[in-house]
Amino acid sequence: MRKLFFFGVLLLIITSCATEKLNLSPLSNNFYSETKGSNSDRGAKKGFDINLKENVNASEISNLISTFPKFKNNSLNDEVTSLKYSLQNYLYAIDANNPAGKNRSIKSFEKSYKKIQKLRQQLDKDDDEVLNRYLVRLKTNISVIEDSLKGN
């Protein structure tokens, strides 16, 4: 029985180290097209020249969306869900070269962000610090992406 248990644990350790980690990102690899048109293919259409798939900040936003914690306050959780959808739409709009959609999602993000700031007053100190860390990281990554878009 001990040998069977030992080999079971050994098999589990070997296979867990050899397998690739599961991608829980809301922006899966299927979302991105394999070939993006070059700038000459876009013609007169003015768009974004950013490779979102390889952008560290977009990946960070995607990871933050998927790991955002749940709180005891239901209205806060509802607003966090709205914030997540705004961020997903923001990333989709950038990838789809849609400036109007990007601007709408930024406005929606800012609206949810302001509501969350008001709801933060009801949280205990630990939850408030966790929420603040997530919000600061989100705003920082969005700022970096926006700066890189303006630089084009």
Image: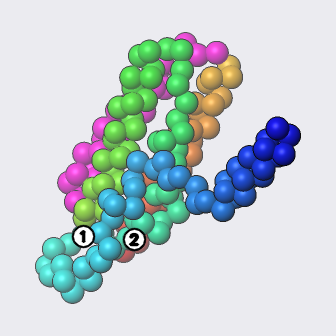
Where residue 105 appears, x then y in whole percent? 29, 45
Magenta-tinted stretch:
98-124
Where residue 48 appears, x then y in whole percent? 30, 69
Residue 106, quarter of the rendered image: top left
Q: Is residue 75 left or right of 8 when viewed as pictured?
A: left
Q: Residue at x 20, y 54 (%)?
A: 100
Classed neighbour count for the residue bearing mark 1: other residues with Cα under 10 Å, few (<14), some (14–19), many (≥20):
some
Residue 112, quarter of the rendered image: top left
Q: Quadrant of the N terminus?
A: top right
User: Magenta segment: does it hold 120?
Assistant: yes
Three-letter residue code for mark 1: Gly
Instruction: Say which residue label 2 marks.
Output: 51
User: Magenta segment: does it hold 35?
Assistant: no
Instruction: Say which residue label 1 marks.
Output: 47
Where residue 12 appears, x then y in whole percent? 70, 49
The one nearer the camera, 86 or 25, is 25
